[in-house]
Amino acid sequence: MALNDSYPQHVVTAVIVAHDGAAWLPHVIDALLEQDRPVQRVVAVDTGSRDRSGAVLAAKLGQAVVFGMDRGTGYGAAVSRALQHKAASVSVPAPAGPAGAERVEWVWLLHDDCEPAPDALEQLLRGAAESPAAGVLGPKVMDWSDRSVIVEAGVTIDAVGRRVTGIEPREVDQGQHDGDRDVLAVGSAGMLIRRDVWDRTGGFDTGMALFREDVDLCWRVHAAGYRVRLITDAVVFHAQAAARRRRPVSAGRRAPYLDRRNALMTLLGNLPFAAMLGSIARNAATSFFRTLYLLLAKRPAAALDEAAAVAAVLGHPLRLRRTRQRRAPGRRAAYNRLRADLPAGKSVREMAEFAASALSRSPQLDTAGMHHATDDPNDDDFLLTDIGIVQRFMTHPGVLLFVGLAIVAGIAERSLLRSGPLGGGALLPAWGGASGLWREYWQAFHPNGVGSSATAPPYLALVAGLATVLGGKPWLAVDVILLGCVPLAGVTAFLAAGRVTRSAPVRVWAAAAYALLPVATGAIAAGRLGTAVVFVLLPLIGLSAGRMLTRPHQLARRAAWATGLLVAVGAAFAPVLWLMTLVAAAAALIAFRASRRGLLANLAIVVIVPPALLFPWSLQLAAHPSGLLLEAGVQQAGLAAPDLPARSLMLLSPGGPGLPPAWVTAGLALAALAALLASRQRGAIMAGWFVAVLGLAAALAVSRVAVTPAGGGAAVPGWPGVALAAAAAGLLLAAAAGSESLTGLAAAGGRSGLRRLISGRGLLVALLAAAAISAPVLAAVTWISSGVRGPVAPAAGQAAPELVSALPDNGLQQRTLVLRSAGGRIFFLLLRDSVPGLGDSELTPVPAAQRALTAAVAGLVAQNGGEAANLQQELARFDIGYVLMQAPVNQALASTLDGVAGLHPVNLAQSFDLWRLDNPTSEVTVLQPGGSTVAVPSGWVGASGSRAPASGGILELAEPRGGWSATLNGHPLTAVASPAGSWAQAFRLPAGGGTLDISRSQPGHDLAIAAEALAAVVVAALALPGVHTAAETQEAAPAPAAGRAAAEAGGAAEAGTADAGGSIPAGPGTEGDAAAGPADASGRRRDSRIPGRGGRAGARAHGSRPGRAARSRPRRPAPSADGPRVPRQAGPPEQGGPPPAVREADQLAWPADQPAAGGAAWPGRDGAVGAPPAAPGQGRDGRAERQGAAAQRAAPWSHPAGQPDRGRHTAGRPDRGRPQQAREDPARTANGRAAPDGQVPRQPAAPPSSWPASDQPSSWPSAASPSGSADRPGSRPDSADSAGWPAAGEPGQRAGQELEPLPPAGEQPRDWPRPAADDRSAHRWPAPDRDREGDSR
Amino acid sequence: MRASLRGRILPALLVVLALGAVYGAGSLRHPAASAASAASRPGRAPVVSALRACPAPGSTGVTAGGVALAAAPGSAGQGQAVISRLIPAGASTAGPAVSSVTAPGQLQLLPVTAAPAVPKALAAGQAGSSAAVRTSAGRGGILIQATGALAQGIEAEQTGPGGLVTARCEAPGTSFWFVGPGQKSAAQIEVYLINPDGQAADAQVSALTDENPLVSSDTGIAVPPHSMVVQSLNALLSSSQVIALHVSTSVGRVSAAVRLARSPSEPGGWLPAAQQPARNLVIPGVPGTTGTRVLYVAVPGGSGSAQVKITAVTAKGSYQPTGGSGIDLPGSSAWAVQLPSLSGVAAAIRVSASVPVTAAISVPGGAAGAPAALAVASAPVQQQGVIADNPAGPAGSAELVLSAPWAAASVRVTDATATVPFGREPSTTVQVAAGHTAVLPLRTPPGVKAGDFAVLVTPLPGSGLVYAGRVLTAGGVTQSILPVISSPTWVALPAVGESMTALGS
């Protein structure tokens, strides 16, 4: 330890804390020892490393200065302990320099993965000398692997606790951050702190264990009155192994939890009280949303971490108080000084950006911390164009279409645009508030009419949910659904059209033609909420079903859940959708059964999810299958044509009120017919026509069936709206797909301009286009000019007289029987407290009670009906106090009612006739032994605390039997047969009187509803796009491309999800949009660029995360001579030179001796560790099980569908045996460190063509059939190919030219690296929890 | 190129074929969607209770008499009919029972003694009274409350002390029409309103005459529960030749009866209630006695005149006694039309009018002190019709005039006595050709006093509508004509169904 002359008055004690850092330690120690200005003392702690860290330390530094600690020890505790070590206080000879200079003791903190530049300490000390008030000095931190990249230059913490460095991801250091300055904090790697300051502040907060302790310490240093300075000329190279999850955090809890908890502790501990309160609020809100988001993204563990971190801090106020007390001195002053350095949280802005991006469906901008799948790759017409969000949003053709359709609809629906509920036709007005709807949905017993114990239709919950969002106004929700269905359907159709055509005009045309179909105008005019919903959902269902049929396995499964969910939502409104889905699923099964793996399961999901989600209700439907043909709302005659002519069906006109002339859609049919002759997109065209014919047949069937609603009433003809919408969607699919040929046809003339137009073909094209365009235009024009012609109207006037609907003060509830004579029939309605509202029509009354009521009403309206029954008593048993007839009054019926004994006309108004029963009725009566009755006050359902008459008798309820319980003074009463008949509920009431309680419960119903809600959440979670697992990436991208894409997109994974060693979750766009389903294999431009785009975007956004380091590594020559230098020619078999990322990926994947996967994550710079030969890009995937991982990696996981889920599925595969074989290879030495550098022959990464193809799944990609690779989706070249990167499936041709093919399983590869005998790395680097979690997803 | 075109044409043809198939299937006639099947089909319910009320005995001049009651239940069963006296002051429960009947199917002749006089306070008059129109509590009056089998097919008639005066005990209702001669021939016109229910009723009487278009008692007549109110219309209807009285209630219901007498001191006769105004009416039971028939037609419709066509349905067929063009009658009034050609012809008179009308026809004769014997428009006999008593007396006779104005009818006629219920005696089946009338003499079954038998008239299945009237004749003079009305054993229930839009949409 030779001293040099610089800054002799400073005594520096270097403290190295090592924890599983054997990979970096040699460099770190070398760099420390070779400092220009050496340290005087070194203390090294090994906190229970499972690798050779301790040995390395001892070997390099000598046993005397090294000691060990528990594996669970935190960094702060380790440093504190190290400073108490005797080596930390070894006396240092006085400097030889000029005396008088006061000696200053310094502590230099080094991590096991941070390598100081040779002059780092010198520069730091220079800074210390220049700025005597500095208590802490920190270096500029550069990336370990790509040493041109700056990682950190001072650290601060923002309002929501995020660590802010001010450095862009992957920012190359060009001196832009240089300049010594005061900062809030510097990282602990390379931090130089005065020992007295350390002692005074107490060092790191040992409670924090890991993460943020540096910020906290520096904050406290500020509070103590010192300065924290950044010295940018001092440089350390930091691998940030822990922060990047390169290695597991064994110091206590898991990393995200610690990270978040410590961030909160730092903020809340160091902020003054008022600021702390604000911070608590801000962080609680942020965490709430983050947790929610993480849950939605199906990352429950991360969500748990987030929530647990907040709970850990806020849940222990005493601990927080202690923490604050310790930090109290100087806190206020420090805060005032540091305030400017504390950046505000960016959350709000980021949220807004995120929302805007999601809305405009354009790629995410810089949204650190969130990544979200842009699940439709075809919508990115403004890829990366850097224009404002608003402009981007507003100029989207989809948005323009929406606005245009909204204007058309608004004008056409002018008569309906009122504040207040709509009613009429099939639609019952949505009175009241959202809570009422929720209650109606939740209740087991509905006090409507005679009472209904039917399961409320699930669409009530959906409308109620929407109403809740819309401020608790169900009528607004109905308006949005019904009146908004045209623009909404336009948007969904626009999205769906993107699957077939890229041409924006064609998409807009198809969407507008769909949205303005007669089905929509008819549904609006007749108040068919169900058709409106299905109409909007249908394109999405098609889109989702298309994904299910074309995407790789796991994505297809997700799409299946989504399809099932969408169908469930639609079927809740119009169950016929489920029937059609059933038929379509059967057809799909027949059509694709051979070609798609997991198709049966997916179709089963689609078919089973709706009835399962709608469970208690679907049971009810099963009991009345005819209800499958009906939809939400009132079924009444006149809303559907009883004998719809076939030509109407052919022209997509469903019959009923509010339809345009049938010919407006003729152009659409013409266009679809013309598409039959198109030469391109044959598959889509024929699929479209298949759907269309199926839909037409279904429409025919539906329109020819007369259905009797389950609740009784007249049979009504079915309305084929939903089926015709499906047929129309099919026609549009065909037409839109055919449009490409149309343009081709036009271009075929070869001429341009007017000449082309007047040529024969041009004219044909123009005519066809005009015909096609005429459909939406004519529909819009006729709709606007005629308005909505139908029974739907604002329902303001529809109400019962007020005296009827009010509950009297005495608590004697009275119901009103409404009679109406229409078409020679007499209709009735029993009203309780309210007039019929949304959903009431589906609440089938209890049949026995309804029959009894029907008989009573028939007797009431019959001539001399009083001779057949005691009408007064009959009415009283239903608690009918009033009989009402709205004008126009049927006089014969009125005089019949006049002649009913006990029924007195009252208040004959112009608008209604009203009769009152002489004897007031009530819901609860007691039939006394003497025969007289006593009314008992009650609520609308049941009674509580009512007085029972002392006489006793029979307690009669005007309610259907079943589910009721009554107690007198707390003692339950026995149910007896009711004098009213078997339908009614009655109890024996003992004499003596007392307090009467009557209630109804149905626990089974509550359970069923709860289960339904849970199932809905689960299915939604399964259906929602989530974080993309590595497996998906592998499935979605061809193996070589995956390497590159992975490298680029590596950063895309949020830190929380990143897998050990920077394994590669897909970037947003990468989701198999590399998509590339087989059907999509045309290799069109947009497909080929997707992965690259996704990767770029992801990397840009998240580059500070693992992948970046990996990417840059190859650029930097390995500094150590013993690194496993990969011979260039042995690298990936590129000719033109692969993108750096690819090389990097390969190197990462490059093994020394550790076939076990954990090692694969590790770059193995010194050759100590590594991974066995692996497919390029796959090697970094540290998530797979160690045993199988290498095998998998070696496998060409280029075909999505053919890809089993990871190692556990690979047992039977032929490549399974390779790693084991390799491990047994005696030719290799046990330890990679001893392995001859650079001598490791590069094995071909992809499996050779000699693999038995027969063992592969039929869809196994190019590896098995190299020649066919170009057509295989999985191996379709992506942008990387332009750089000369070969398709995975061509190793035998290209890779094989240079490299020896891998021997078939069973033969030993000649130069196979020998695995570590004890496979230690498996223990050293266990796959973090996160990986297992990922696997289980 | 050509091959690929062929590759495209084939699928296109397939699609067109499929479309054609759908179109063809859609064009096929399919069985019409099952016509509106009602939630409740039209049904029937057995009659389980019945109320009948009549004013006598006890009304002026008729202080003794009784009730003849017969029920023809549709099936065996228990039943009871309680005959109780009305309470002048009204009460929520029926008055004391004077007798009770439990044997259905037989004729019950129940003497009812004269009712006590009405207390002075009540007799003085009450609300609705005026100098011209005096309303007072009625003396006497009985209420029949039948349940079970005795309510099925029940018919009750009040009998006068001499046995010849009969009138039907009416079921309660809200609207009654009476058409007959005016005060020129009947100086005494009284309306009896009986409230058979436990709640008060509010009734109104309005009259159409040939003199004044419309007169009515100004205020409602309060009829206390279970009581009878009598209103004398003498002053109101002075010098009218024809009257049509409309008794209606605004609250509750009443049974109404009208008594006509040539002078206040004579007992006179009861005017049967006529059918509610309708465009087509049939007046059955015109006997074959000689004498001028006068048709009284009331046209309640407010404005304009009624074009009335009159058809006589006789044993020899139908003809139009006033000519094919009919007659014009001004609205809001009642008119008399002489029909001299009908003398001596047993017939039913069919009246069709351009607006709803109601009508009656007078035949010379009638009860002691009555201006004439009156046949009134009546509904056809549905299910069955019962005549409770045929008190023709030793010198008299009873006959049934059956008419089938529209389609041929066949009717089974059987009788019952106080000991032999309906169905035991042999029945007679009468065939009536379409547009014809048949007269069936009613002979007293052996072993009973003359006339003490009940008759059951049952239209056979498939029969056309049949209208019937029972005519009592004594010494060649028509004593009374009673239209046979339906005595149902069941009530037809209309189809009703629940509708969410019953409130209107």
Image: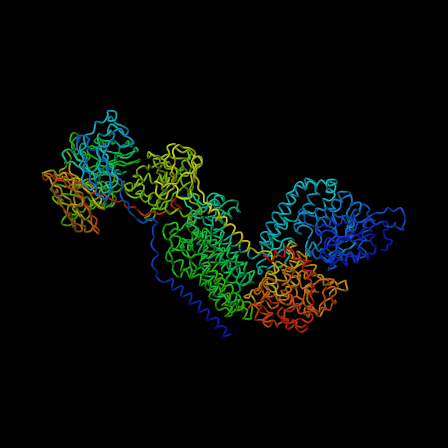
Where, by quadrant of the figure, is residue B469 drawn?
Answer: top left
x then y, percent, for residue A851: 35, 46
Front residue of this view, candidates A69 and B494: A69
From the viewer's perspective, tell me whether residue B302 is left or right of residue A617. Answer: left
Residue A700's quadrant in the figure? bottom left
Q: Nearer the viewer, residue A973 or A525?
A: A973
Residue A116 found in image quarter: bottom right
Residue A1014 sits above or below residue A1197 on the image: above
Question: A1071 or A590: nearer the eye?
Answer: A590
Q: Residue furthest bottom?
A: B2
**Residue A9 image point, x, y percent:** 86, 49
- Residue A1250 % position (x, y): 61, 73
Whether residue B221 is visible here, answered yes or no, is no
Q: Residue furthest top?
A: B120
- Counting the numbered discs, the total is 0
Indicate the quadrant containing the C terminus of chain A: top left, top right, bottom left or bottom right.
bottom right
